[in-house]
């Protein structure tokens, strides 16, 4: 008996119209949908009158559930993997099941679609020909600054995700470590209150203020100028241990 196929299905990050016809077809045809948040996925499925079995697959059960999903695929069942929103595995669960399926020679088929990082980058006005996606920064300031120091000399445009509870602190740390570069904060992409805030990091810090702002954030930051990047690299080399 042939194995099933694992489909990596991108879903809307806000606006329910942001889904491809192919994704809707696959979701209606598979035997099972593995969802990071079954409640949110149910909203999408109900909107398009799709009735399919759902099983939860999120950060805290990913390791345990992977084996069972692989067994279902080996029995010939087709499974669609969806995250809470956007493209699965991109700062979301899914890596384990994809890797496990490949190891078992099970077909893995990606269905391209919405990704907040790419959406924000496309409207950032910053260089888009080369970029580096860093996902979520560490929640603690010390570790966050250490990571920012490691990428301070990166010449590519930088993209980060951030929560509403840490966005001001993250911008402040970026300003301190990276310098006052051009940057964009994209909030609530594709949703009713979508907002883009343009400026330098110091301008963004002022505009964001200190009160808690609701929403999901994507931050796009200008890469390090080439000359400064070389200075940072040379400085790191001079102070490297044992050299």
Image (spheres, rainbow, N blue to C red):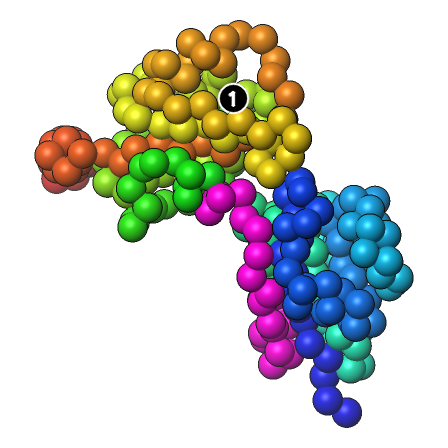
Answer yes or no: is residue 154 visible: no
User: x, y (%) of residue 96?
Assistant: 62, 60
- The residue drawn where x is 58% and y is 8% is 211
Q: In this view, does 228 lie to the left or right of 47?
A: left
Labels in figure, total? 1
The residue at which mark 1 appears reads as 167
Answer yes or no: is residue 17 visible: yes
User: x, y (%) of residue 95?
Assistant: 59, 58
Image quadrant where one finds the C terminus: top left
**Quadrant of residue 232 in the image?**
top left
**Quadrant of residue 73 in the image?**
bottom right
- The residue drawn where x is 36% and y is 27% is 183
* Closer-to-camera residue (21/121): 21
User: x, y (%) of residue 155?
Assistant: 24, 40
Q: Is residue 155 magenta?
A: no
Q: Is residue 70 left or right of residue 55?
A: left
* Closer-to-camera residue (35/16): 16
Q: In this view, does 203 lie to the left or right of 219?
A: left
Image quadrant where one finds the N terminus: bottom right
Q: In this view, does 69 lie above or below 165?
A: below
User: x, y (%) of residue 180?
Assistant: 28, 19
Q: Residues within 10 Å of mark 1 (few under 14, many from 20)?
A: many
The residue at the far bottom in this view is 1
Describe the element under mark 1 as helix, strand or loop: helix
Q: What stretch is highlighted in magenta?
A: 98-119
Q: Is residue 107 magenta?
A: yes
- The residue drawn where x is 72% and y is 83% is 3
Q: In this view, does 117 lie above or below 105?
A: above
- The residue drawn where x is 66% and y is 30% is 192
């Amino acid at each position: 008996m042939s194995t099933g196929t694992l489909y990596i299905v991108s879903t809307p990050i806000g606006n329910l119209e942001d889904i491809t016809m192919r994704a809707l077809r696959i979701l209606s045809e598979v035997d099972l949908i593995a969802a990071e948040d079954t409640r949110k996925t149910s909203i999408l499925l109900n909107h398009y009158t799709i009735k399919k079995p759902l099983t939860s697959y999120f950060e805290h059960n990913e390791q345990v559930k992977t084996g069972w999903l692989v067994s279902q695929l080996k029995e010939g069942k087709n499974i669609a993997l969806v995250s809470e929103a956007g493209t699965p595995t991109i700062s979301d669960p899914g890596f384990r099941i994809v890797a496990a399926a490949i190891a078992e020679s099970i077909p893995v088929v990606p269905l391209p679609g919405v990704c907040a990082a790419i959406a924000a980058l496309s409207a950032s006005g910053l260089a888009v020909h080369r970029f580096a996606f860093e996902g979520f920064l560490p929640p603690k300031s010390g570790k966050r600054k250490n990571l920012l120091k490691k990428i301070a000399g990166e010449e590519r445009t930088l993209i980060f995700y951030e929560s509403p509870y840490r966005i001001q602190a993250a911008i402040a740390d970026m300003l301190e470590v990276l310098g006052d570069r051009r940057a964009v904060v994209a909030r609530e992409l594709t949703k009713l209150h979508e907002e883009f805030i343009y400026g330098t990091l110091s301008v963004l810090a002022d505009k964001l203020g200190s009160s808690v702002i609701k929403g999901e954030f994507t931050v796009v930051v200008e890469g390090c100028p080439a000359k400064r990047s070389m200075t940072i690299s040379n400085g790191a080399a001079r102070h490297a241990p044992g050299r």
